[in-house]
Image (tube, rainbow, N blue to C red):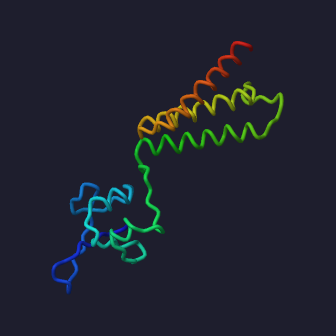
Amino acid sequence: MPRLRQPSINHTEPRTQTINHSGDPEIFDSSISQTTVTDSLPEQTVIVTDQGKEITVGEVKHSNRIIKSKTPKGDLSWWIKWTSSVIVLFAITIRSANIPNVELAGIPLQLWDMSLSWLGAIGWFVVGFMWKDRALILLNGVIGVLLFSGILRWILEH
């Protein structure tokens, strides 16, 4: 687990402490994004990685090589986005199989594809709403409406 070392006034004995997301000396929460940590700390603060490598907050802020995640990790939106992604992958797998006249649990594969795709789109719509991301809201909202209309049409025809 990464540790942070605040620069000390006496350079002979550096002071090491770990912090949580609120900045209190405790255990560093590695689930928060690096940008949150680096925005709230002085640039000369040293981060000690699990491998023992020391890098400053300034290096993280200004680096083109260190990838800084912008999305939350471990919160509700994280669970919804990954669940929705897996559901969409199942739907695409069914679609790419392109097996005509096959049913799974008495339901045609085409309806499974549309239903799973709709669930995934609704999940991503919710994530877009949580993140206030208009592109995700627009894209998945339109996809959700189109897929739902296809599901309704299929139900009414059969």
Image side of residue 58 versus residue 136, left or right: left
* Drawn side of residue 150 relative to residue 122, left or right: right
Q: Nearer the viewer, residue 52 or 45?
A: 45
Extreme residue toward the right, this view = 100
Q: Quadrant of the C terminus?
A: top right
Expressed as whole percent of the image width and height from the top left, the position of residue 152 reads 65, 17
The tally of labels here is 0
Provide residue 12's location: percent of width, then percent of height.
Answer: 20, 87
Q: Residue furthest bottom?
A: 12
Image: 92 above or below 36: above
Q: In the image, is 17 to the left or to the right of 114?
A: left
Figure quadrant of residue 54: bottom left
User: Which residue is most to the left?
Assistant: 9
Residue 110 lies, in percent from the top left, at 74, 29
Tell me the quarter of the picture where residue 43 sits. Answer: bottom left
Quadrant, the N terminus: bottom left
Name the residue at 69% across, 40% down.
Answer: 92
- Tell me residue 77's x, y (percent): 44, 42
Q: Looking at the image, which residue is at 69% across and 32% down?
A: 113
Which residue is pictured at 61% across the width and 23% down the height? 148
- Residue 56 occupies which quadrant of the picture? bottom left
Residue in the foreground of this view, choosing between 144 and 106 = 144
Q: Front-most of 48 and 40?
A: 40
